[in-house]
């Protein structure tokens, strides 16, 4: 499974470190990656990891970007795309 890069801006690193330390000390053993991601998100001020993910902007789909190049600024198709998947996306306009 590919991992997505998520930017995380922390305004107060001291309170982040204290909250993360307190959360990690509450566990008896080293938490798994999902629990660790949740602890980082909570220390950064989010409810959970999903809340953090929803706050980051999504990357545009590369196929959609290719399909958008076929249309001009008024929305008129200027050419027919070469790739079959891009052709399928362009047909949704009609």
Image (tube, rainbow, N blue to C red):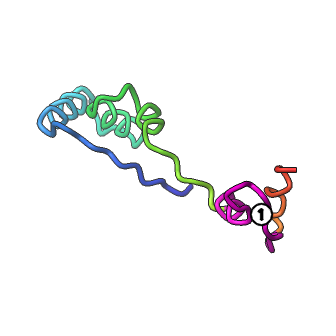
Where is residue 89? Give x, y as percent.
79, 56
Residue located farthest toward the front when viewing the structure as drawn: 74
Occupied quadrant, residue 42 = top left
Give me the residue at 24% from left, 26% from top.
Answer: 26
Where is residue 57? Give x, y as percent.
47, 44
2 in the magenta segment = no
Indicate left or right for 16 with 73 as reference. Answer: left
Indicate left or right for 33 with 24 as reference. Answer: right
Provide the major secondary structure of the magenta segment.
loop
Give me the residue at 40% from left, 43% from top.
Answer: 33
Is 2 rendered above or below residue 40? below
Give me the residue at 26% from left, 32% from top.
Answer: 43
Give the extent of the magenta segment: 63-83
Classify the position of the N terminus by image quarter. Answer: bottom right
Mark 1: few, some, or many residues within 10 Å (few <14, many ≥20)? some
Occupied quadrant, residue 20 = top left
Occupied quadrant, residue 71 = bottom right
Where is residue 86? Give x, y as percent.
77, 63
As rendered, which of 9 and 71 lies closer to the eye? 71
Task: Give the labeled residue for mark 1.
Answer: 86
Give me the residue at 78% from left, 58% from top.
Answer: 76
Indicate left or right for 77 with 1 as reference. Answer: right
As rendered, which of 89 and 69 lies closer to the eye? 69
């Amino acid at each position: 499974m590919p991992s997505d890069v998520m930017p995380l801006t922390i305004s107060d690193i001291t309170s982040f470190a204290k909250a993360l330390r307190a959360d990690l000390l509450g566990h008896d053993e080293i938490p798994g990656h999902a629990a660790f991601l949740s602890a980082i998100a909570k220390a950064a001020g989010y409810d959970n990891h999903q809340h953090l993910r929803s706050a980051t902007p999504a990357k545009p789909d590369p196929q959609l970007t290719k399909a958008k190049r076929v249309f001009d600024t008024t929305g008129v198709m200027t050419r027919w795309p070469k790739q079959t998947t891009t052709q399928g996306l362009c047909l949704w306009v009609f």
